[in-house]
Image (spheres, helix red, strand yellow):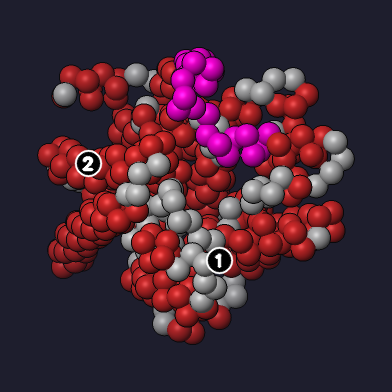
């Protein structure tokens, strides 16, 4: 184990990116073979939805004529080369965003002034060579696009280029609405004031960030509303607030939503949303220091996904991409990292059997899926609690060292 880690640390980031790209190209080629020869297809069903939406755009129609297309029109535009040239170009684009995300992880860690170059490379490898990440992007999921945009937002924020940060952040919210939960986390640290009054301190950095974010999001929303009307707003934004998924769902609310799928209950939406909202606000309040931004973003993303009404495997990439940004500062032992990974992997993997029996065998395994979802929920909460506890211990140690230096 140790020689392998040292070997990974010794290789340059460009070599890692080249190797990661090659592995993804192999998986795309294998996916073509599996799609043709096996009953269980490798390509994600959403990729076919993207293709159909792109075909409608190519024909001069709305992408929302594809009735299950619930994304920004920009994604359909990105898939136009699939229609014009080859159906695999979209996967190649997602791989490019995937590799770019790994490079951004490396850049963010290198720019913090604390992480060694070899450690930054190793953390980038946690994304570049992650089997789940490779599987998701090569199957044709577009999550690598939003992941890259969020990481680019963090990188620009770290560089204090707040106008560009806001423009990219607005684009990220447009592409997938969940990054809006980061708005206070990015806004609050940009002041020297404390308390409630600090929220109203409109300095240059805050004005640039807020103005550019609102401008970016407003222009994109207006442009596509003008082109596609209410259908765009409903499919891109509103649908994801009221969405229910009664089949493939890791959510702790899965069985409740399955039993009430025929009912439209506002109270149910509030009950499922309230714990999520409270925790997100508490995390923002607790970790509002400029040095805690990356940590807070990770915790918020993990909480948002874990407590969400709908949880699919693609959502895991949202917090997987932020985990390498905080691991170096936590100083976990290799044993802790291994045990945490095994716990998460086993809890997630055990869900797959009843889900497979439901989808491909037609067995009624809804109750078992929910029970496995409960176990997965507990595993995520336990891991998050350990990470927060470790972060507080490290922060306390640093504060004590600073106080000793002041006394000297």
Q: Which mark is residue 279?
A: none
Closer to us: 135 or 385: 135
Outermost residue toward the right in this view: 60
**Left of 344 or right of it: where is 78?**
right
Q: Which mark is residue 242?
A: 1
Position of residue 318 measured from the top left corner of the image (x, y, whole percent):
44, 48
Closer to us: 402 or 279: 279
Residue 294 colored in magenta in the image: no
- What residue is shown with label 2? 346
Q: How many marks?
A: 2
First-in-chain label (2 vs 1): 1
In the rendered view, would you say 330 is above or below 374? above
**Left of 108 or right of it: where is 242?**
right
Where residue 222 sits, quadrant-wise, is: bottom right
Outermost residue toward the left in this view: 335
Secondary structure, mark 1, is: helix
Residue drawn 23% across the image and 49% down it: 330
Q: Provide the residue span drawn in magenta.
A: 25-51
Residue drawn 71% across the image and 61% down it: 233
Residue drawn 59% across the image and 67% down it: 206
Residue 147 seen in the current view: yes
């Amino acid at each position: 184990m140790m020689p392998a880690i040292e070997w990974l640390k010794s290789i340059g980031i460009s070599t890692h990116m080249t190797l990661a790209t090659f592995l993804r190209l192999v998986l795309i080629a294998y996916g073509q073979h599996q799609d043709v020869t096996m009953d269980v297809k490798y390509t994600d069903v959403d990729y076919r939805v993207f293709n159909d939406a792109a075909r409608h755009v190519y024909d001069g129609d709305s992408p929302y004529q594809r009735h299950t297309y619930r994304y920004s029109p920009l994604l359909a535009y990105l898939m136009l080369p699939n229609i014009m040239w080859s159906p695999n170009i979209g996967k190649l684009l997602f791989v490019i965003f995937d590799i770019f995300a790994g490079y951004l992880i490396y850049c963010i860690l290198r720019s913090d002034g604390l992480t060694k170059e070899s450690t930054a490379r190793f953390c980038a490898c946690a994304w570049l060579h992650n089997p789940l990440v490779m599987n998701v992007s090569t199957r044709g999921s577009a999550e690598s696009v939003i992941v890259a945009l969020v990481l680019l937002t963090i990188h620009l924020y770290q560089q204090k280029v707040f106008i560009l940060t806001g423009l990219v952040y607005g684009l990220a919210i447009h592409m997938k609405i969940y990054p809006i939960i980061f708005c206070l986390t990015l806004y609050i640290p940009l002041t020297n004031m404390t308390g409630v009054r600090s929220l109203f301190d409109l300095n240059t950095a805050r004005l640039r960030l807020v103005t550019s974010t609102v401008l970016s999001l407003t222009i994109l929303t207006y442009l596509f509303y003008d082109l596609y009307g209410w259908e765009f707003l409903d499919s891109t934004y509103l649908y994801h607030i009221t969405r229910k998924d009664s089949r493939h769902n890791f959510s702790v609310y899965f069985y409740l939503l399955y039993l009430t799928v025929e009912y439209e209950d506002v109270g149910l939406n509030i009950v499922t949303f309230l714990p999520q909202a409270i925790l997100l606000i508490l995390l923002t309040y607790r970790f509002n220091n400029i040095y805690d931004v990356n940590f807070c973003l990770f915790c918020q993303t993990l909480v948002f996904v874990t407590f969400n009404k709908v949880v699919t495997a693609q959502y895991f990439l949202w917090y997987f991409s932020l985990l390498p940004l905080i691991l170096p500062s936590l100083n976990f032992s290799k044993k802790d990292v291994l045990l945490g990974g095994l716990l998460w992997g086993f809890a997630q993997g055990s869900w797959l059997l009843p889900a497979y029996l439901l989808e491909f065998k037609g067995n009624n395994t809804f109750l078992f899926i929910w029970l496995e979802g409960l176990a997965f929920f507990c595993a995520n909460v336990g891991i998050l609690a350990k990470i927060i506890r470790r972060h507080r211990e490290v922060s306390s140690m640093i504060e004590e060292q600073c106080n000793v230096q002041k006394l000297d």
